[in-house]
Image (cartoon, grey):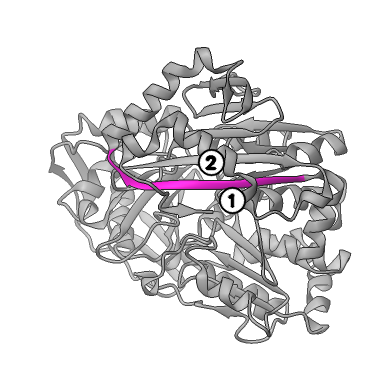
Amino acid sequence: MAIVSIPTQPYAGQQPGTSGLRKKVTVFQQPDYLENFVQSLFDCLPNTAGQTLVLGGDGRFHNRVAVQTILRMAAAHGFGRVLVGQRGILSTPAVSCVIRKHHAYGGIVLSASHNPGGPDGDFGIKYNVGNGGPAPEKLTEAVFARTKEIKSYRISDQGAPDFDRPGTHHLEALLVEVIDPVADYAALMRETFDFDAIARLFRSGFRVRCDAMNAVGGPYAKAILEGELGAPAGTVVNAEPLEDFGHLHPDPNPVNAEDLIAHMAGADAPDFGCATDGDADRNMIVGRNFPVAPSDSLALLAAHATVVPRYARGLAGIARSMPTSTAADRVAKALGIACYETPTGWKFFGNLLDAGRATLCGEESYGTGSDHVREKDGLWAILFWLNVLAVRGGSVESLVRAHWASYGRNYYSRHDYEAVDSAGAGTLMAELRAQLPRLAGQSLNGMPVAQADDFAYTDPVDGSTSSKQGVRVIFADGSRIVFRLSGTGTEGATLRVYLEKYEADPARQDVPTQAALAPLIAAARALARIEQHTGRTEPSVVT
């Protein structure tokens, strides 16, 4: 067998977005498309000879083919060892866990996260660095530049070894070690949470419905909730990862997880409902007929963090993405700790976590995490909630309502306009930016504007800067409208509009969310001329 060099030509548009390169499966199936990107990545990584690489994905369609290709390319580039999840499976937080535990050089995650799967669905690839977190912009920009000039790629002509069973194999000089995808992650969860308290909760008759949405979170939830903590068999549903997610859209929100919402609204609803997404880094928490907003989830977990063994000594700080509601800010202020506002994308939390400035972090798109890994983590968030409930008692709803009574309620919603014309979306954002200098002092729908800007971020650890991270309109009462284009879609553009209003009075904390936000919704549509630019009279998804 030999290492061969294959001539190739660049493909346009191989620019990693917020969480790597995501395209339709049919795009990745083009000759040399994946190989070009992987070669460009390897070209930008220094000193890889003899190093350990972690490899796995969410099991969606094309995952196995991609694993085989990357193993053969890793062998051609001098890596010493690859730790690959059995069947090519590793959740995104598990990749981060394995990188950190085994002091690996880095890892490749194969996933398009919450995007649909199957032959007509989406595929994705991203690189995580040695701290376990997503590659910084400096690296992703270098990889993109390299994709535009690539002329050949190197690959072994030897077939990839069997990765369906644990064991070790050699591919050229590369040691391929097929690992149990759950073991290292489960050990970390055992160290983090009070498993005895959660097990007692289950023995008391507490019932849970965990919907893994036929995605990669299923094996992890089955092993930990049912296997280690004693939850009854059947607690985890849709637990087998399927290449097309069983035609489910593995995005855990009240729209796409409608089966879970229906069960939690039934007469015999369990005590606690939860779901994870395609690669198990997102989560949704639901009480009996009571969905929990992700911004509220972050704030509540921060407020109760000391009941969890890992956080018993308190939190160093909290970090949230800019579009996420300011609910966590109020908890941080009460605790006397810092709260950092970052751009969207988990990579921006990495420096804060590594520097010990933040312990918990979260974003409004159902992502929550901590310094235990360098990714958001869906099952970790579910275990955190169960740990809090086991110690504090009560129900999901009673915990949230008590939190609102103490800190006030941040009414919050996200309106997504999906797959809109990219040119129209770009014009919409350009027009918004042009209005910014004159918005402060104006009134929109009767609400005075205190501040309007295009969010920019300077990392307090390394001084790096990121600009044009989203248009913010902040009103005199603290209400906010945020506009940004998503970097996680694969068709056209997705316009996200975030709306937030704070309510301190408990007597006014039961208004339906969309009704409470109605003046802001009207102001956002008029200000951005959404219908004119997108042709849409209503958002595709409201969460």
- Give residue 540's position: percent from left, percent from top: 40, 53
Label 2 packing within 10 angstroms: few (<14), some (14-19), many (20+): many
Relative to residue 480, is residue 250 depicted above or below?
A: below
Which element type, helix, strand or loop, lies under badge 2?
helix
207 vs 307, left or right, is left
- Give residue 41's position: percent from left, percent from top: 34, 38
Viewer-closest of 444 and 293? 444
The magenta-colored residue range is 409-421
**Mark sitting on residue 521:** 2
Which element type, helix, strand or loop, lies under badge 1?
helix
**Mark sitting on residue 514:** 1
Q: Would you say residue 183 sits in the magenta stretch?
A: no
- Give residue 370's position: percent from left, percent from top: 68, 47
Viewer-closest of 429 and 103? 429
The C terminus lies in quadrant: bottom right
Residue at the (50%, 17%) spot, across then down? 436
What residue type is disc 2 on?
Ile
359 vs 322, left or right, is right
What residue type is disc 1 on?
Gln
Asked whether disc 2 touches disc 1, contact meaning CB atoms under 8 Å apart, the reply is: yes
Residue at the (46%, 77%) spot, across then down? 240
Residue 138: name its quadrant: top left
Q: Magenta-highlighted stretch: main secondary structure? A: strand
